[in-house]
Amino acid sequence: MKILVINGPNINLLGLREPEIYGRQDYKALLEYIALAGVEANVPVECFQSNHEGDIVDKIQEALGKFDGIVINPAAYTHTSVAIPDALKAVAIPAVEVHLSDISKREEFRRHSFVKDACINTYAGFGFEGYKKAILYLKEYLEGKRS
Ligand code: CA2
């Protein structure tokens, strides 16, 4: 079992501004947190970040046959992209959506996710912990312990 974690635009700038929304920790700390979550869950995890929608679509397509599950924080593309959920549906790799902030309680334009329908679950508003929850959820799902 192998899980791919995808982070979208500007997540690489975490910690620079808006700590009240995204926390004080930077992207390097997020990568370390996710790596530890993978070790604790005993699941190999690979991380990918891009500021480009097409690169994220390419990565999802390339995941076919290589990864069993995808954790994705599409960042701003959550609210604009049709290509990313289309790619997730096309490869049919079980995916869990993650957001650091609770997008349901933010500006109107952030409340809708185009990606949600292509995912088996969503964690929003748990900060870094959302990624761990997503990895554990996917692990149980892939082991057949969740439907
Ligand atoms: O809450 C989340 O995880 C988001 O996906 C984060 C995105 C935002 O566009 C989504 O609506 C919700 C933004 C990620 C990074 O934003 C930064 C803002 C200031 C400084 C550094 C990064």
Image: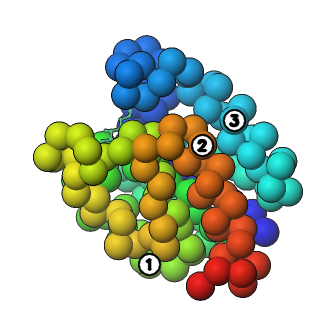
Evaluate whether residue 143 shows in this view. Answer: yes
Q: Read off the residue under disc 3.
A: 33
Q: Nearer the viewer, residue 71 or 41?
A: 41
Q: Secondary structure at mark 2?
A: helix
Residue at point 14%, 46% (across, down): 108
For disc 1, the marked residue is 90
Q: Could you tell me which secondary element the residue under label 3 belongs to?
A: helix
Position of 50 with respect to 112 (left or right) is right
* Quadrant that contains the N terminus: bottom right
Residue drawn 22% across and 52% down?
111
Under mark 2, the amino acid is Glu
Q: Nearer the viewer, mark 2 or mark 1?
A: 2
Residue 94 point in image, percent of width and height? 56, 73
Residues at marks 2 and 1, CA–CA distance in whole angstroms = 28 Å
Q: Nearer the viewer, mark 3 or mark 2?
A: 2
Q: Which residue is mark 2?
A: 129
Residue 17 versus residue 56: which sits nearer the camera? 17
